[in-house]
Image: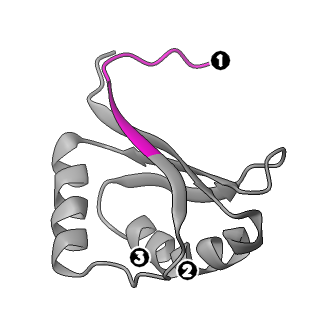
Amino acid sequence: MRFMEQILAGVFEMDPTQRDAFLSARVELARRSRQEPGCVDYVFAPDPLEAGRVILFERWESEEALAEHRRGLASNPPEDPGIALLRSQVQQFAVTEVHRL
C-alpha cells in the first residue's frame, strides 16, 4: 500500500517554569488544527523526563492538507505567548509506506 501522509515531529525547549504556559497557549491551536480536513493527529505533549521540553507530533493525510494548514496559520497565526524558547526544531517526513504493528 502506498501512502503520502505527512508527519511533523518537533521539540521545543524552554525554562521549565514556562512549560505549562507554553502548553496552555497551544491548546486552541491544537483544537483548531484537529478540525481541519486531512488532520489525523495534532499534539503538543510535555516530555515526562525533561521538565523544560515539549514534543510536537502532527500527522496529515496528504501534503495538500498540510499545505492548507500552513496557509491557515500564515493568515491567522496563533497568539505569541511571549515565552522564550531555548531551542526548537521541527522536521517534516513524507510517509510512503506504513507497516502496522
Crowding at mark 2 (Cα within 10 Å: few <14, some 14-19, many 20+): some
Can you tell which of label 2 and label 3 is closer to the viewer? 2
Callout 2–callout 3 Cβ contact below 8 Å = no
Q: Residue at x 69, y 64 (%)?
A: 15
Callout 2–callout 1 Cβ contact below 8 Å = no
Q: Residue at x 37, y 16 (%)?
A: 97
Crowding at mark 1 (Cα within 10 Å: few <14, some 14-19, many 20+): few
Residue 32: image tag: 3
Which residue was labeled with disc 1? 101
Left or right of 90? Residue 63 is: left
Residue type, numbered disc 2:
Ala
Which SS class for mark 3? helix
Crowding at mark 3 (Cα within 10 Å: few <14, some 14-19, many 20+): few
Residue 18 vs 65, above or below: the answer is below
Q: Out of 50 and 97, give the one closest to the viewer.
A: 50
Residue stretch in magenta: 89-101
Residue 25: image tag: 2
Kindly report the distance in space between the C-alpha atoms of the residues bearing marks 3 and 1: 30 Å
Q: Residue at x 54, y 75 (%)?
A: 83
Can you tell which of label 2 and label 1 is closer to the viewer? 2
Kindly report the distance in space between the C-alpha atoms of the residues bearing marks 2 and 1: 34 Å
